[in-house]
Image (cartoon, rainbow, N blue to C red):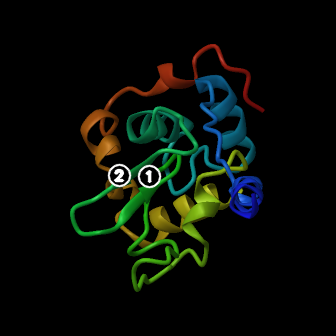
């Protein structure tokens, strides 16, 4: 009986992260309001394209890598350099917990992505962007979206 009560209590304490998958136009609006359009010379289309190829707009996307680190969230930000995860001795340049990058609130992810673009070689950090977005006409990524 005690064990069943303990298990029930533990079940209540576990936080479940439900995936939120944004639409292209909803992200365009969020990214525009966050100042990503033309941030460091990268159009809104670059950001929307990159987020699609990194996470398919899934806020809870995670990829475990061979080096023991993990890529987190809509921008697939790596735990070794950019956020804090309990398993590794990370650099945590964004001064944020990796779990804060996998929520529906994209504020921390956007702030960190801006820092990555500012402190590295632009959007070259993201392989999805390099392979699918770099040097392409990206105007279609915000086509039909109302951005302010």
- In this picture, is 32 found above or below 26? below
Please identify the quarter of the rendering in which residue 80 is found: bottom left
Q: Secondary structure at mark 1?
A: loop
Q: How many marks?
A: 2
Depth check: 39 or 21 in front? 21
Q: Secondary structure at mark 2?
A: loop
- Residue displayed at 38% across by 69% down: 120
Residue under label 2:
126
Depth check: 31 or 38 in front? 31
- In this picture, is 116 found above or below 25? below
* Separation of residues labelled 1 and 2 (CA atoms): 8 Å
Q: Is residue 60 left or right of residue 56?
A: right
Judge the density around disc 1: few (<14), some (14-19), many (≥20) Cα neighbours within 10 Å.
Answer: many
Name of the residue lying farthest toward the top:
144
Instruction: Determine whether label 1 and label 2 are within 8 Å by CB.
Output: yes
Image quarter where the C terminus lies is: top right
Mark 1 or mark 2: whose residue is earlier in sequence: 1
Depth check: 89 or 123 in front? 89
Q: Is residue 47 left or right of residue 108?
A: left
Please identify the quarter of the rendering in which residue 111 is found: bottom right
- Residue displayed at 52% across by 57% down: 40
Judge the density around disc 2: few (<14), some (14-19), many (≥20) Cα neighbours within 10 Å.
Answer: some
Image quarter where the N terminus lies is: bottom right
Q: Is residue 31 left or right of residue 127?
A: right
- Residue displayed at 70% across by 53% down: 11
Residue under label 1:
76
């Amino acid at each position: 009986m005690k064990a069943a009560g303990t298990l029930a209590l533990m079940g209540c304490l576990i936080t479940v992260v439900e995936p939120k998958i944004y639409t292209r136009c909803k992200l365009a609006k969020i990214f525009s309001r966050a100042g990503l359009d033309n941030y460091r010379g990268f159009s809104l289309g670059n950001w929307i394209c990159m987020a699609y190829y990194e996470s398919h707009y899934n806020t809870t996307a995670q990829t475990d890598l061979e080096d023991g680190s993990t890529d987190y969230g809509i921008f697939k930000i790596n735990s070794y350099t950019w956020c804090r995860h309990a398993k590794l001795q990370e650099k945590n340049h964004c001064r944020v917990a990796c779990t804060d990058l996998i929520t529906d609130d994209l504020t921390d992810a956007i702030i960190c992505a801006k820092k990555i673009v500012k402190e590295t070689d632009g959007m070259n950090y993201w392989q999805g962007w390099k392979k699918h977005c770099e040097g392409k006409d990206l105007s279609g990524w915000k086509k039909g979206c109302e951005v302010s």
